[in-house]
Image (spheres, rainbow, N blue to C red):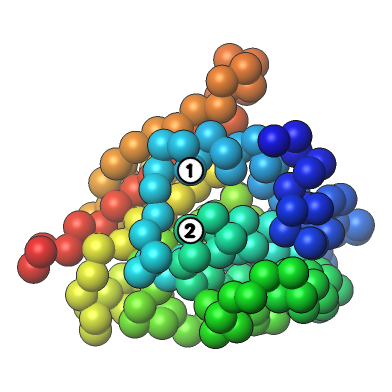
Amino acid sequence: MKQKDYDKLLNVKTEGDQKGFSKSLHYHRYEATPYRALEELFNNYQLRISDRIVDFGCGKGRLIFYINHFFNATVTGIEMSERLYQEAVENRINYFKKYNKRHDQIHLHCCLAEDYRIDPSDNRFYFFNPFSIQVFMNIVNNILVSVEDSEREVDLVLYYPSEDYIYFLENDTSFELKEEVILPGLYEDNANERFLIYRLAYLGA
């Protein structure tokens, strides 16, 4: 499917990047993950209907609508920009106009990523390099605290993974690299065009 056709399929509008920059140096400019990249990711990494995915820096919601449509999984989008959050809310309304889906499968929160309270059922977390290593560390620590309270297998999916993120996960946490998904035709010219999937295994499994 052509990239421009996905928004039409999902009945949403997710094109365009963020205008202007965040006042905080810790938060990066929003850019949606290309549909082409999502195709490649999910050709190699499968989700289950029982998974609960959190997208930190969800913007207009492209990832969460894509996942809900194709995997029927519960998704949560976290967005600090009030304008982008409102666009995601509008997309949610239009998505439900076209598809008879359960409304409790798509959640949106307008807040700082580190202020989101991890749900005990959240088990897949997506990051498109949305913020500084300091914020990322806080969020990973929140996830780890949640896992201590409610043990489960957890995956972190990183697109355009920063070296700081990688170093922290591999040297200061128990997450282990499970899989690397590169984007053919792009990775050869830009080594950032890849996904890294880190897993924290459930020891009681």
Badges 1 and 2: C-beta atoms under 8 Å apart?
yes
Residue located 47% across and 84% down the image = 117
- In the rendered image, residue 61, in percent from the top left (x then y), is placed at 69, 64
Q: Secondary structure at mark 2?
A: helix
Residue type, numbered disc 2 = Phe
Disc ID at residue 42? 1
Of residues 93 and 88, the one drawn nearer to the viewer in this rendering: 93
Q: Residues within 10 Å of mark 1 (few under 14, many from 20)?
A: some
Image location (x, y in percent) of residue 112: 64, 77
Q: Identify which residue is drawn at 47% across, 67% down.
A: 73
Mark seen at residue 134: none
Relative side of 198 to 186, left or right: left
- Label placed on residue 71: 2
Image check: 27 left or right of 76? right
Please state which amino acid type lies under the numbered disc 1.
Phe
Of 74 and 165, the residue lying toward us:
74
Task: Classify mark 2: residues with Cα within 10 Å, few (<14), some (14-19) or many (20+).
Answer: some
Question: Of 68 and 15, which appears nearest the observer?
Answer: 68
In this image, 19 relative to 8: left or right?
right
Which residue is located at x 50 percent, y 28 percent?
Answer: 182
At horizontal 29% and vertical 52% (from top left) the residue drawn is 199
Q: Of discs 1 and 2, which sits in the foreground?
A: 2
The numbered mark, 1 or 2, whose residue comes first in the sequence reads 1
The image shows residue 29 at horizontal and vertical percentages of: 77, 54
Give the quadrant of the C terminus.
Answer: bottom left
Quarter of the image that includes the N terminus: top right
Local secondary structure at mark 1: helix
- Which image quadrant for residue 150? bottom left
